[in-house]
């Protein structure tokens, strides 16, 4: 039975099917409307850096055939074959889109869907209709994306522009000078029967075997670009002059240079070369002052060596990453590293294992008891193992290259998730609170409240965004990092997620709704499922 998705829902492909040879079908229609359905193969920056992975009517497959446009079949307006284990590593996301060709808007469309079929069985379906859109002329329907493993997301995001707007959104270019090429739409020829891996047709037919090779005639007739691997590599460049072997003990004189021995310092072995301006008997590294100035034909008439750029100097390179000057007790060294300056009477608490370096007389002790040690681990399950850092000196803290931010409290309060805390002053008061939620595993969602005067260092996966709390602000439970104490947080759950889904990923089913007066905020990281 197919798993039903709503807009914004995500899942691992491995939770839907064990296969990697997938059929993606799109059904979309509307009175008097014509649609172009495409697939964008995007890189890690979600850009179309290689236009060979823009799969549409005029380019029906990728170079290695991992993404193929199949045409209308089995009740679908358009369909694709995607072989996940053959997609090159630079392609991190496949975005399936639909655009209106001509006049019209997405609010006019009839109920439709995007579905995934594996082994002849439908395993996922995202249904949509015109009520979800207004004046948009293009929509991103769903994504297959790589995040440790391949996953599926139901997107349903519209664009007021058409295909041109989508291309520009993904970093592609629109060729304005060739409008006449548009009518040539080499459609995929009709097949007497669907490919072996495709879903069974509407008429009664035996279920096809999984992963069988496609029918020989299904490839589109569009001429394929010549593969890069087929190009003839250039022949090695011939040396500009014959190479001469000089036996040991004999002096080699470059062509056009002054007579042999002129550049040899007193006491230097025969044949040793000393650049003009260098001290006799010393070695002058390339790029140092006086090294090879104005040399016309060094080393036997070969191409002159390019000078080493000043920025490659060891001291210059190291200076760029020098320790930041001391600010106050907490100093952000860079976006991923924070330094705490300690004194004996002012210890800090930090995530265990987050110390990457320290200077001075510092002692580290496991914080296994007390309020945080007991409540955070035993009651909330958020699991925050702490260490107590004391002494005189400096401690450098980081956690898997996450971004770090220092939040300084002056008699104020702030809520955080335990997973988002890297370190904090021991002087701060801490309290674990539960956000009640009916029907949730364990009865609620837990957070930490910091209050008093001091600093909390939070970490995020990626650059966060601070959202003002409005009448209805919802945040995924995995993405929330912190929020102001004046904001009220309540839990909500997705109605279509089955209760059995909570066993593996409890927070995947939890959304937090924030309410509050103007001036309240919530901090969200770009990381969830």
Image (cartoon, helix red, strand yellow):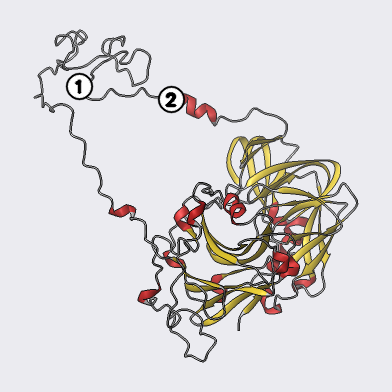
Q: Residue 457: horizontal and vertical position, in percent?
A: 71, 45
Using residue 129 as the reference point, say whether residue 124 is left or right of it: left
Q: Residue 313, which numbered label?
A: 2
Q: Local crowd at mark 2 within 10 Å, few (<14), some, or many (≥20)?
A: few
Q: Left of 384 or right of it: where is 178?
A: left
Viewer can see residue 300: yes
Q: Is disc 2 in contact with disc 1, using a CB cutoff of under 8 Å?
A: no
Residue in the image at 74% along x and 73% along y: 441
Rendered location of residue 360, percent (x, y):
61, 33
The residue shown at (10%, 27%) is: 245
Residue 513, image x, y percentages: 81, 61
- When asked about the image quadrant of residue 105, the answer is bottom right
Secondary structure, mark 2, is loop
The residue identified by callout 1 is: 301
The residue at the point 21 percent across, 10 percent down is 263
* Front residue of 166 and 109: 109
């Amino acid at each position: 039975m197919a798993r039903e998705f709503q807009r914004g829902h995500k899942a691992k492909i491995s939770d839907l099917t064990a296969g990697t040879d997938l059929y993606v079908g799109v059904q979309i229609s509307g009175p008097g409307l014509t649609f172009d359905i495409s697939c964008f193969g995007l890189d890690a920056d979600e850009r179309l850096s290689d236009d060979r992975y823009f799969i549409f009517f005029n380019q029906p497959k990728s170079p290695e055939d991992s993404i193929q446009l199949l045409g209308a079949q089995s009740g679908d307006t358009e369909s694709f074959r995607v072989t996940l284990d053959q997609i090159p590593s630079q392609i991190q996301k496949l975005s399936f889109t639909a655009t209106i060709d001509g006049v019209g808007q997405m609010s006019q469309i009839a109920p439709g869907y995007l579905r995934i079929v594996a082994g002849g069985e439908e395993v996922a379906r995202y249904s949509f209709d015109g009520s979800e859109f207004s004046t948009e002329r293009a929509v991103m329907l769903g994504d297959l994306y790589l995040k440790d493993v391949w996953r599926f997301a139901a997107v349903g995001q519209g664009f007021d522009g058409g295909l041109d707007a989508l291309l520009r959104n993904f970093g592609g270019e629109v060729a304005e000078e060739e409008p006449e090429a548009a009518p040539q739409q080499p459609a995929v020829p009709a097949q007497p029967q669907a490919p072996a891996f495709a879903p069974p047709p509407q008429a009664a037919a035996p279920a096809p075997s999984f992963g069988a090779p496609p029918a020989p005639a299904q490839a589109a007739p569009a001429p394929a670009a010549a593969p890069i691997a087929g190009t003839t590599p250039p022949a090695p460049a011939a040396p500009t002059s014959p190479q001469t072997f000089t036996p040991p003990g004999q002096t080699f004189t470059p062509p056009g240079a002054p007579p042999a021995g002129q550049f040899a310092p007193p006491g230097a072995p025969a044949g040793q070369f000393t650049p003009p301006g260098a001290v006799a008997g010393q070695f002058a590294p390339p790029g140092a002052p006086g090294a090879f100035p104005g040399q016309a034909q060094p080393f036997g008439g070969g191409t002159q060596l390019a000078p080493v750029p000043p920025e490659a100097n060891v001291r210059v390179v190291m200076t760029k990453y020098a320790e930041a000057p001391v600010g106050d007790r907490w100093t952000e060294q860079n976006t991923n590293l924070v330094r705490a300056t300690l004194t004996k009477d002012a210890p800090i608490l930090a995530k265990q294992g987050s110390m990457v370096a320290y200077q001075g007389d510092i002692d580290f002790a496991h914080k296994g008891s007390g309020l945080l040690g007991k409540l955070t681990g035993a009651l909330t399950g958020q699991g925050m193992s702490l260490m107590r850092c004391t002494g005189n000196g400096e401690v450098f803290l980081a956690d898997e290259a996450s971004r770090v931010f220092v939040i300084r409290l002056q008699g104020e309060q702030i809520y955080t998730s335990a997973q988002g805390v890297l370190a904090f002053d021991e002087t701060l008061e801490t309290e674990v609170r539960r956000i009640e939620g009916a029907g949730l595993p364990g009865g609620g969602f837990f957070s930490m409240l910091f209050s008093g005067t001091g600093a909390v260092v939070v970490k995020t996966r990626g650059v966060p965004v601070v959202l003002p709390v409005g009448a209805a602000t919802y945040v995924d439970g995995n993405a929330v990092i912190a929020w102001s104490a004046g904001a009220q947080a309540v839990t909500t759950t997705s109605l279509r997620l089955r209760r059995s889904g909570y066993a593996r990923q409890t927070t995947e089913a939890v959304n937090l709704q924030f309410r509050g007066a103007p001036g309240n905020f919530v901090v969200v990281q770009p990381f969830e499922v």
